[in-house]
Image: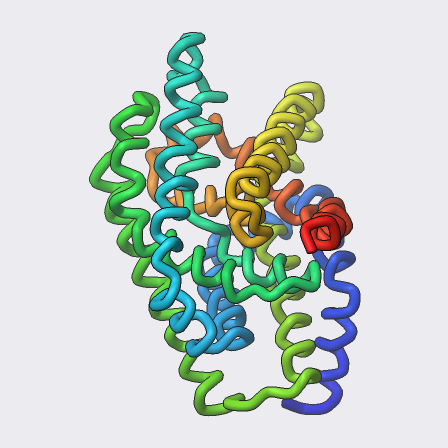
Amino acid sequence: MPSMAKSFLTLLAHHGRLCLVGGLLAGLFAPGLAAALKPWLPHMVAGLVTVSALRIGHNAALGGIRMGGDIAGRVLALQVAAPILVITALNLFGLNATTVGLSLALALAGPSISGGPAITAMMGFDPTRTMQLLLVGTLLLPVTILPVLWLQPAIGGFDEVLLAALRLCGVIVLAAGTGFALRAYLLPDPDRSDIEALDGLSALALAIIVVGLMSAVGPALRDSPHALVGWLALAFAVNFGMQAMGLAVFRSIPEAIVAGNRNIALFLVALPATVIDPVLVFIGCYQIPMYLTPVILGRFYRGYLRRDA
């Protein structure tokens, strides 16, 4: 890697939180740019997975999966038990078939966001466990999503959703495999400066991706700001609430991060427009607590580690 590019990426790594905030602001106040980037989201997500896999390496990621039999159980708890509990509670109040009910079901049914390992590393924690949860959660998604589809009446197009889940699995496996191969052949023994440069590249990719994910938020801010505030409050409550519950249940920071930060963007390409359009603002709002996790919760998690030590 050229020294100038490496220095620039290292600088971004040291200011990764500012990169995320910059991406959020661009997505909010540059709707034209957000609309232009939206069609490229699948490609950018795949690229981010490749960078994350390159940073971690196959020995750490896959070795931990082989040794840790509890990974699949924790994924099932996050992607099956959590949404079923919420859907059951919503049914008691007659809210399951509403837009809010659909939003909550989608928020909890998805696997970890592709940027989960990068966000974990940005807070100073080892991203290996987060990558393991991302890989296993994505591979199990075609199975874990079935009861959610069955219990959520607002979700249509069962075959399309299942095919989208399978496509996502293929993309994640291919992208992660590419990153692992690059690490094995190009960076078998990276030094600290190499890792910092990759962290900076991840921060840059996350900042660009969020611009496209927030394509519906800018227009909502202009046309219906009061409704937007409600959706934003719901997004923060769900995201940070799930992170707190994940930490309390699993007593593990990677699981807590994954519990709140889910890949809802998957459903943008999986569901019919008549189903997904009312949820677009929530999906955009949900990016805000996800991208602010390192800014707001980093100190909280570090304090938790000190108390638990």
Taking the spot 47% from the left edge, 28% from the top edge, the residue there is: 104
Where's residue 215, x and y in %? 58, 42
- Most distant residue in the front direction: 309
Q: Which quadrant of the view contains residue 285? A: top right
Identify the image quadrant of the N terminus.
Answer: bottom right
Taking the spot 68% from the left edge, 51% from the top edge, the residue there is: 308
Q: Is residue 26 visible?
A: no
Where's residue 250, x and y in %? 51, 44
Q: Which quadrant of the view contains residue 124? A: bottom right
Q: From the viewer's perspective, tell me whether residue 97 is left or right of residue 144.
A: right
Taking the spot 73% from the left edge, 49% from the top edge, the residue there is: 307
Identify the image quadrant of the C terminus.
Answer: bottom right
Where's residue 242, x and y in %? 56, 36
- Nearer to us in this view, 85 or 46: 85
- Nearer to us in this view, 73 or 184: 73
Indicate whether 137 appears above or below 99. below
